[in-house]
Image (cartoon, helix red, strand yellow):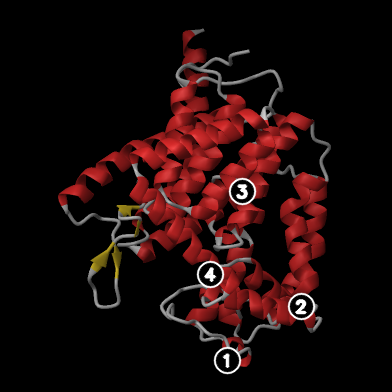
């Protein structure tokens, strides 16, 4: 009997490692992306293939998701054939498949929410604690592994209000803030173990220390929608603001100036590649470009690497960001390349679990939060095709649907707490 128990235990451990394998590869690739970019790309590809083949071997799929995907395929193939360069189309086309593969994988591991939640929360906490080490080295003036390279080879780090932006071990403040945001709401909903309040405080604190304005804006909007006692929430925010004004007034003023600058640059004056990309998108849509310019032709890294002629055709102005690998916006990239019809169909595929499943209200709220956070971030970034953002968000969609409503989890015990 003991032998049988041990065998089952070893089998479960092996199965868990197989499930978690792509997560480790993807986040390891994020750590390596600055100094070992080629290795980082290979790890991401291995992770995507692992999830794809695992899903195929599982042989079970969500019908509505599969149907919407098949409807999208002809437009996707046309977008590749119609592109200015087949190589650019194929390399960019792989990125289009990232969220689709993630959702396939999410369905195939839909009964493993407890495992996913524990590992994700622990991973985010490790990032937050490691950030303390980053601060220590920064204060000492020591060059750190995640500092970026200028064209002349010198190193620099992202800072705002005179403070280095928190990156943890994932090396990018945008991803760091995003995983803290998702971890906060998942923990708030499902975790009932010890020190829940402290864990939530850590997530909020380090989210703020990333100085990612789009994530902080998302956080306040979602918290306001989620919080039942809205008056109490407003009073807490006002109290926090007044406390910050007393403790760190100069930092608060600097943050306000930075926020105002971003509004001017991206919205009111539009003197940036981001704003310029939206100009191109609205121009294309106003001309009823239903099928797009072709995959890999605008906005993404392939369009830059292969010198897409679209930028010249639309008189695109990079302003002072000529070294960008993308336009740092997702929706202009999607709708310029795929057109109105292809772009909408692609978004329907990604959103199909939200639209075509009958959700219980409490589950719908948390799934809506995940989708809102990802889609809002994509207004100012490339996160909808960034595998790390996707694995920290869309991977939870189907497991949340299949979790028992009456179950919440602890980080330290192997049993479910009711």
Q: Which of marks 1 and 4 is in front?
A: 4
Are the residues tagged 2 and 4 within 8 Å (C-beta)? no
Image position, residue 100 (x, y; %): 67, 55
The residue that mark 3 highlights is: 373
The residue that mark 1 highlights is: 312
Characterize the local packing of mark 2: few (<14), some (14-19) or many (20 or more) Cα atoms within 10 angstroms. some
Are the residues tagged 1 and 3 within 8 Å (C-beta)? no
Image position, residue 235 (x, y; %): 57, 32
Q: From what the image shows, is residue 321 above or below residue 354?
A: below
Characterize the local packing of mark 1: few (<14), some (14-19) or many (20 or more) Cα atoms within 10 angstroms. few
Work out which quarter of the rendered image holds the C terminus and state it.
top right
Q: Which of disc 4 and disc 2 is earlier in sequence? A: 4
Q: Residue at x 50, y 62 (%)?
A: 260
Q: From what the image shows, is residue 72 above or below residue 376?
A: below
Q: Which residue is drawn at 53% across and 37% down?
A: 238
Label number found at residue 76: none
Q: From what the image shows, is residue 150 above or below residue 103?
A: below
Label number found at residue 285: 2
The residue that mark 4 highlights is: 264
| Secondary-structure class at tag 2 | helix
Q: Distance between the residues labelled 3 and 4?
A: 23 Å
Relative placement, left or right, of 49 versus 72 is left
Image position, residue 399 (x, y; %): 66, 35
Query: Which residue occupies the foreground of this view, 165 or 27?
Result: 165
């Amino acid at each position: 009997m003991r032998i049988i128990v041990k065998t089952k235990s070893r089998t479960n451990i092996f199965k868990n490692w197989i499930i978690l394998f792509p997560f480790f590869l993807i986040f390891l690739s994020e750590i390596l992306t600055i100094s070992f970019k080629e290795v980082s790309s290979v790890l991401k590809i291995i992770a995507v293939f692992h999830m794809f083949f695992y899903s195929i071997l599982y042989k079970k799929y969500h019908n509505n998701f599969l149907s919407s995907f098949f409807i999208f395929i002809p437009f996707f193939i046309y977008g590749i054939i119609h592109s200015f360069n087949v190589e650019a189309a194929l390399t960019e086309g792989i990125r289009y498949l990232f969220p689709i593969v993630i959702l396939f994988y999410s369905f195939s591991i839909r009964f493993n929410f407890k495992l996913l939640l524990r590992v994700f929360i622990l991973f985010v906490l490790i990032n937050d604690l490691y950030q303390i080490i980053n601060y220590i080295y920064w204060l000492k003036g020591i060059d750190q592994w995640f500092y970026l390279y200028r064209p002349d080879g010198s190193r620099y780090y992202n800072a705002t209000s005179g403070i280095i932006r928190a990156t943890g071990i994932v090396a990018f403040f945008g991803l760091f803030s995003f995983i803290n945001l998702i971890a906060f709401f998942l923990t708030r909903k499902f975790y009932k173990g010890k020190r829940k309040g402290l864990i939530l405080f850590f997530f909020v604190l380090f989210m703020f220390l990333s100085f990612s304005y789009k994530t902080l804006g998302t956080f306040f909007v979602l918290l306001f929608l989620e919080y039942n006692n809205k008056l109490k929430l407003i009073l807490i925010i006002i109290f926090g603001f007044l406390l910050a004004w007393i403790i760190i007034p100069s930092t608060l003023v600097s943050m306000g100036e930075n926020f105002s600058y971003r509004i001017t640059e991206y919205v009111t004056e539009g003197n940036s590649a981001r704003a310029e990309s939206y100009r191109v998108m609205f121009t294309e849509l106003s001309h009823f470009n239903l099928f797009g310019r072709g995959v890999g032709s605008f906005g993404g890294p392939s369009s830059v690497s292969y010198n897409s002629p679209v930028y010249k055709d639309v008189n695109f102005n990079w302003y002072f960001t000529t070294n960008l690998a993308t336009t740092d916006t997702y929706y202009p990239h999607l709708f310029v390349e795929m057109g109105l019809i292809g772009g909408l169909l692609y978004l329907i595929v990604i959103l199909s679990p939200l639209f075509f499943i009958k959700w219980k209200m409490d589950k719908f709220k948390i799934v809506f939060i995940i989708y809102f956070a990802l889609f809002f971030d994509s207004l100012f970034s490339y996160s909808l095709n960034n595998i790390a953002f996707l694995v920290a968000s869309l991977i939870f969609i189907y497991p949340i649907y299949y979790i028992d409503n009456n179950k919440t989890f602890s980080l330290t015990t192997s049993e479910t707490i009711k």
